[in-house]
Image: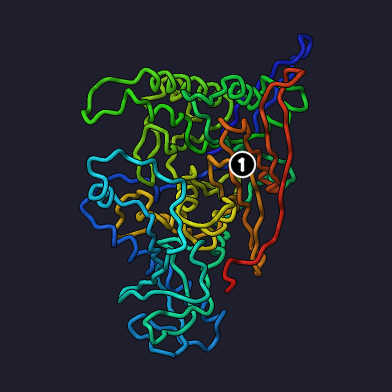
Amino acid sequence: MASSLLCTPLLDEESETKLVRASCSYKDLSGSFRVSARSYKKQYAHIYAVRLMAMRKALEKVAKTKWDGVPIRKLADVKIDSRCCVVGTLFKRMQLRPSILKEVSEKQGQPTMPAPERFISDSDSLVLEDETQRIPLAGNLPVDISVTGTVIALMGKESSAGTFEVESYAYCGLPPPSPKSSLRIDPDLEGGDDRYVVLVSGLGLGGSRYDALATQMFIDTITGELGGLSDQKLFSRIVRVIIAGNSLSSDINSNKERESKIITRKIDPLSVGAIKELDDLLAQLACSVPVDLMPGANDPTNYTLPQQPLHKCMFPQSVVYPTLNGVPNPYQCDIGGRRFLGTSGQSIDDIYRFSGYDDCMEILKHTLFACHLAPTAPDTLGCYPFHNVDPFLIGECPDVYFAGNQPVFKSEIISDSNGQSSLLILVPDFSLTHQSVLINLRTLDCRLLTFGTDLSGGSRTDSTHVDTDTEPMDES
């Protein structure tokens, strides 16, 4: 779908110049993340079985290339002191892992202790499982940066102690490229005409950190109501705005007055006011540019992944614009022939809590090289009990892979030995940083846009772009 909208900036009184909003081809590819008929009668074991079956062939191919001549066996066929390759799903045993049964049995009648920020410890250990059995792991496999649910290939041998001694390991690597038939670049981009997409997350309406002035400056800049003529010409080339979750603040959900064991029909006026204000902001945006609205952990939709689009009845003003597009989380689309794939950040935050990663960009890389959006779901991250498909598998390499609501902005282009590349972006939390990301569809360059007051009363724009080739995460 392509749309052509007028953007009429405020120019001097003698000028009647009108800038036409640029348009670009668009296709929503998030069908696999939309759950129509919901049933919670299935067991979660099915999603692990489906995940392993879907990724086994790709990992066996990687293993044959990396460890030529080493036989590939099921865990039931592994022999002591016989080197082989096995493919399976990691499970991380964690002493500090939250357990509701443990809390009830040990702390009944005691005051609840605040949960720690991270649940890793030196006593953590790894187990590999496939369709046949489980086996404890030891050797050359980093426990701290491994997480439950990751499908991996291991090369080593079983010891007399009953553990599999890992000598080397490998993930799938970058997913295969999309078929060329679905990657037709928009003719305007091929002709050298730049088009841009804006990524923003964490507006945080209704919270203590919400900055109405910075948010309005963001809206006015995108719609052409702010900045000079050169700025307006630049921002008229924006063809889409993606709001990556947490449009409302977590302060609303943590309101003590709403914590009750009895469900009532009392509506929190704070959340109602925040939704009304969000509706007003979306109406201002959608009247000028197509907007994709993703839900996040703080937004009024289902808690488990994939989160379904926010219901249109909450936005009576903005829903009248066909350019407002409610989308799920995770979200995938094709804009001008560029494939976008991303989440509102829950999977990255969950892996951070249950691993030793200190850099969220490294976590984002890990999920891409492991070809899975949320490997810790459903173990520590809630998800729908899929039984015949795992929609979180990354089957085709995205041109842009993003995670919203991160503490800082980072971008990096990664590539493999075949020349295939992907732009990874950590979209900063707007309520913390007042920043959004501008992406050039033709070149995949990034510009960080920072909105705040200065001496001139205008907006401040900073630029940064990291372009680094790295080796795939299959090193031993």
Locate residue 129, reporting x and y percent: 36, 72
Locate residue 307, reporting x and y percent: 38, 42
**Quarter of the image that includes the C terminus:** bottom right
Which residue lies at the image location 61% right of the left edge and 19% below the top edge?
A: 213
View extreme (front): residue: 110
Q: Is residue 147 above or below residue 3?
A: below
Locate residue 309, reporting x and y percent: 40, 37
* Horizontal side, residue 101 vs residue 380: left or right: left
Residue 429 sits in which quadrant? top right
Question: Which of the pair 76/137 is nearer the observer?
Answer: 137
- The image shows a total of numbered marks equal to 1
Is the residue marked by circle 1 packed among few (<14), some (14-19), or many (20+) residues within 10 Å? some
Q: Is residue 308 visible?
A: yes
Locate residue 6, reporting x and y percent: 63, 24
* Horizontal side, residue 300 vs residue 429: left or right: left
Residue 302 sits in which quadrant? top left
Residue linked to disc 1: 408
Residue 454 sits in which quadrant? top right
Question: Which of the pair 293/126 is nearer the observer?
Answer: 126
Circle 1: residue type: Val
Which residue lies at the image location 46% right of the left edge and 80% below the top edge?
A: 165
Q: Is residue 98 above or below residue 243?
A: below
Question: Which of the pair 406/226 is nearer the observer?
Answer: 406
Q: Is residue 330 visible?
A: no
Which residue lies at the image location 51% right of the left edge and 71% below the top edge?
A: 141
Question: Which of the pair 136/326 is nearer the observer?
Answer: 136
